[in-house]
Amino acid sequence: MDTDAFLAEVREANETALSRLGSSKSLYAYTDGELEAAAVASVAADVSHTAATALEAYAAGASSDAAAEAFTAFGELAAEHAGTAKGVSDDVPALESHDAVAALSAYGDGSGASDVERLGAVVGYALVAKKLAEQSTGFFTGEADPRTASTFRSYGSDVEARRGEVLDALAVVVDGDADREAALEAATAVVQGAYEEYTERLEAMGVNPKPVC
């Protein structure tokens, strides 16, 4: 499987969602309008924590060594990110699940999901996490906190590296067009789940989610 072409297809299929998740409204939506350091860090911590929990389950249920290794490595990174983000401020609350990436749980234990679907879902998560890392970097840069901005900038680089490993594993386990389509559907489900949460939160605050600012 051509992993570059697959990633490009995921991006193209979710162009609008990814564009809006990469806008300045995304943190406003996910913090419920509380654009303060602790709230932004809490979103990052909870999103990473949710991913780490899902990835641990994925690794435990993996059928192939390639998938298990990719899930384990990305899960460890997500757990590390969750802990670092929580340490940004004493006011960051205890870690909990975040609905922005709840779609990851749909491919967990009892779902009957395959390694192909789970790897696809993680590709979708990586794209969402990269957008949130970019927005968090911008927020802390604006807050004149270059150290924390640098931390979140490194999140984006870390996620891209692990995404590459997930795509490599996907190339190993995909067997034909049906598998490729299943991976694409799973990736899209995670991106669209994050976008739906973004939309619902903005609408609940009386904000139009469509214009990108």
Image: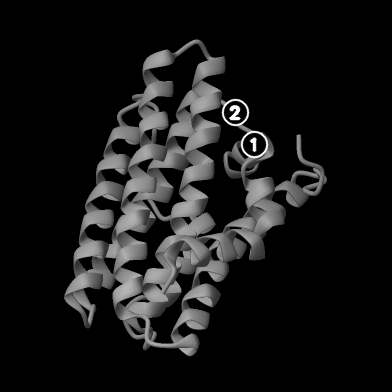
**Quick one: 191 or 41, which is closer to the camera?**
191
**In the rendered image, the vertical position of residue 109 relative to residue 40, given as above or below:** below
Q: Quadrant of residue 206?
A: top right
Residue 210: give x, y in percent of width and height: 80, 49
Residue 88: give x, y in percent of width and height: 35, 26
Q: Earlier in the sequence, mark 2 or mark 1?
A: 1
| Mark 2, other Cα within 10 Å: few <14 / some 14–19 / many ≥20 | some
In the image, farthest residue toward the front: 2
Residue 64: give x, y in percent of width and height: 21, 79
Q: Quadrant of residue 42?
A: top left
**In the rendered image, the vertical position of residue 50 relative to residue 139, given as above or below:** below
The structure residue drawn at horizontal position 36% and vertical position 16%, both measured from the top left corner, is 147
**Residue 193 visible in the picture:** no
* Label pair 2/1, CB-CB below 8 angstroms: yes
The structure residue drawn at horizontal position 37% and vertical position 87%, both measured from the top left corner, is 175
| Mark 1, other Cα within 10 Å: few <14 / some 14–19 / many ≥20 | some
The numbered disc on residue 28 is 1
In the picture, measured across the screen, residue 46 lies left or right of residue 58, that is: right
**Quick one: 59 or 49, which is closer to the camera?**
59
In the picture, measured across the screen, residue 170 lies left or right of residue 199, that is: left
**Residue 185 visible in the picture:** yes
- On the image, numbered disc 2 is attached to which residue? 35
> Which amino acid lies under the numbered mark 1 shown in the image of this protein?
Tyr
Query: Count the marks: how many?
Result: 2
